[in-house]
Image (tube, rainbow, N blue to C red):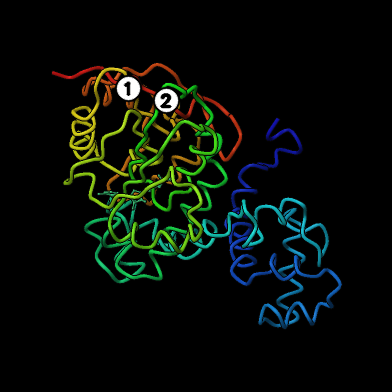
Amino acid sequence: TECSRQDIPHSIISLLDGFKASKTLFTASKLKVFDVLNSSNSQTLEEVAGQINASVLGTERLLEAAVSLGLLERVKQNTEQASRFLVSDSPESLNGYILHCNDMVWPLFSHLENAVREGTSQHERAFGKKNEEVFQDAYYSKDEVKIRFMDAMHSIARVTGKDVATAFELSSYKTACDIGGCTGAMAYEFTKAHPGLSVIVFDLPQVIEMRRHFQPKETDDRVSFVAGDFFKDDLPKADLYILARILHDWSDEKLHVLLSKLSKMCTPGCGLLVSEIFLDEERKRPSRALLQALSMTEGKQRSPTEYRDLLEKHGFTPNLYVIIFLGTRVKDHFISQNALPVF
Ligand code: SAM
């Protein structure tokens, strides 16, 4: 059917244009088009152009392209979805993640040929800086880049966090530790969903020191923050450990270090909750995970069997999985483990 209409390869043609569509979304977000249109929809084109600091002709082209992609209802009106997910101060805004894609991922992908030839991340070519340690060197060496990365994690966690927090029956757990919990966005979703649960967010000191930028009003005293390095430092004691979008960042060797620390902390009845995109066993889908892998440094996307093998080596027994992708349950993408004692 893909080629039925005069043998036109529609899927190839839409891939040819895919980068233009992504960059249209990125540029409209970066220039704050969705914010400007949200504040008033009775502006002239010239006024919109003035507010986004752009030429009238360029603005008109951008707005028309955004309409054609379904990002705008019409030239000067956001769709409902844009008002909900693209306006920067909306509670479910993906703006932070979009800017991360534009400023960090796009430059890396412009060097994809080299990444494939060399089998390495192109951080040095794209940003002029060697990237020995992905988080410490690539993301956290400059405050501006660090805030942008944290903003990206924060925005995705706010949109997906509730599904992760409610995927399993967790009422037997009283204390959780969100390992690499970043801004705490996910932790707050867990305490909202589970009234009897307290959550400790554990992340690098550079991240923990910025938490008030994202959580200015810490109204929930069941969320607390501890700074440390999960490869080197002691982890806080908890009955449920959460690893949300952590495992894919690291090689099997590094994960053995982290998982053996976790298994030593876990007593019978403790849980480990893993949230990742799972590849299907044939490593064909979802393509989102395989595309992400193209710009990875030392991480790797894995199938449920690969995750299970890693976890079982450390005494964790996988027992449940559910798939969640940006708020939609798609297929198996999430496992919970009951930790067995490891002697
Ligand atoms: N769990 C969050 C989520 O799902 O939104 C953030 C995931 S982000 C991909 C990875 C997180 O791991 C970052 O917040 C990063 O700072 C943290 N991290 C990376 N290396 C770490 C280390 N050695 N010790 C503690 N945290 C680390």
The answer to whether 222 is drawn above or below residue 120 in the figure is above
Mark 1 vs mark 2, CA separation in Å:
9 Å
Q: Is residue 302 left or right of residue 227?
A: right
Q: Quadrant of the C terminus?
A: top left
Contact check, label 1 and label 2, Cβ < 8 Å: yes
Figure quadrant of residue 244: top left
Position of residue 222 relative to residue 306, above or below, is below
Whether disc 1's CB lies below 8 Å from ligand 1 is answered no
**Disc 2 residue crowd, few under 14, some 14–19, many 20+, Cα 10 Å:** many
**Badge 1, how many Cα within 10 Å: few under 14, some, many 20+?**
some
Residue found at the far right of this picture = 42
Q: Which of the labelled discs sits on residue 335, or is there none?
A: 2
Residue drawn where x is 39% and y is 24% of the image: 304
- Which of these two is toward me, 187 or 70? 187
Q: Nearer the viewer, mark 1 or mark 2?
A: 2
Q: Could you tell me residue 130's position as x and y percent?
A: 24, 65
Residue 225 placement (x, y as % from top left): 35, 50
Amino acid type at image mark 1: Arg
Q: For this view, does 285 lie left or right of residue 199?
A: right
Q: In terms of secondary structure, where does tag 2 sit? A: strand
Q: Is residue 99 above or below residue 59?
A: above
- Residue flagged by tag 2: what amino acid is it? Ile
Residue identifier under label 1: 308
Residue at disc 1, secondary structure: helix
Marker count (numbered): 2
